[in-house]
Image (cartoon, grey):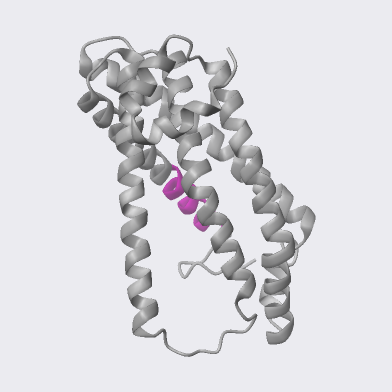
Amino acid sequence: MAIEFGALPGVLFSPTETFERLKKDANLADGLKLYFTMAIIGLVIAICSDIFIEIPKVNEIISRTNNAYGNIWMGGLMTPAGAIASEIFVLLIAFGIFLAIVALTSWLTGAISGKGGNFNKTAGLMSYTGAAFYLFIMLPLSIISMLMTASQPVVPTGAAPGASMMALGIVVLIAVLLVVIWEWLIAGRAAATAVGGTWGAGIAGVLLAIIILAAIAFAVVMVVGVALWQMGVFSPSGMAII
């Protein structure tokens, strides 16, 4: 079945009806097509931002401050090739995280609802959730952020932020928090529809999946960090000593 791009607005504002309509034909293959369509759009924008905005700014800061440490550790990354490689790596990591969240969410939602999970349909429906939020919310915000970054001076003035900027920061933080909660609730609806469970079970399944993955990621980082420290790669202060 072809991807229904016309269903994306409905995912945001009428998720129950939209997911019920999409459920019959939802599957992993279409979900991955939709996921990578959005991912490639994001990848192109991120690479353009890195090459035309971030890299010139960082390289100019390094050259102005004559930061030898920065040149050693960042010089290899502050190139177009390094930016592309970095963004592709992030995309692959994000893809792995997405699949892990879908698999755990499907299983947990099914277990909580007393029904079996359905990875195929959960992947299909949750991909619509991610695509809708990215296309209508995250993408416009990313473009706005990119334009604001481009307009900022290379060397900050050092002036303390005014009250208006602090207030704007608080408003942005609240808005981001509300969007995260909104996406969580709709992802829960997608999971619940996929396995035939309740919305509450879907919400709990998504939350537990994220908590489990965060705990695993924290444990891996700690183990790798301790191993590198014992090998002498890092000192207790976090500075490289080799």
Q: Residue at x 50, y 58 (%)?
A: 229
Whole-percent x, y for residue 119 in the image:
43, 16
Whole-percent x, y for residue 103 in the image:
42, 22
* Part of the protein shown in magenta: 220-232
Number of callouts: 0
Q: Is residue 192 above or below residue 180?
A: above
Q: Is residue 185 above or below residue 199?
A: below
Quarter of the image where one finds residue 213: top left
Quarter of the image where one finds residue 214: top left
* Screen quadrant of the N terminus: top right
Q: Residue at x 73, y 73 (%)?
A: 59
Q: Is residue 240 visible?
A: no
Q: Residue at x 35, y 46 (%)?
A: 180
Whole-percent x, y for residue 37 in the image:
63, 33
* Screen quadrant of the C terminus: bottom right
**Residue 230 is covered by the magenta coloring:** yes
Q: Is residue 125 above or below residue 221?
A: above
Whole-percent x, y for residue 41 in the image:
64, 42
In the rendered structure, the answer to whether residue 177 lies left or right of residue 87 reads left
Q: Is residue 158 visible?
A: yes
Magenta stretch secondary structure, dominant: helix
In the rendered structure, the answer to whether residue 153 lies left or right of residue 201 reads right
**Residue 224 is covered by the magenta coloring:** yes
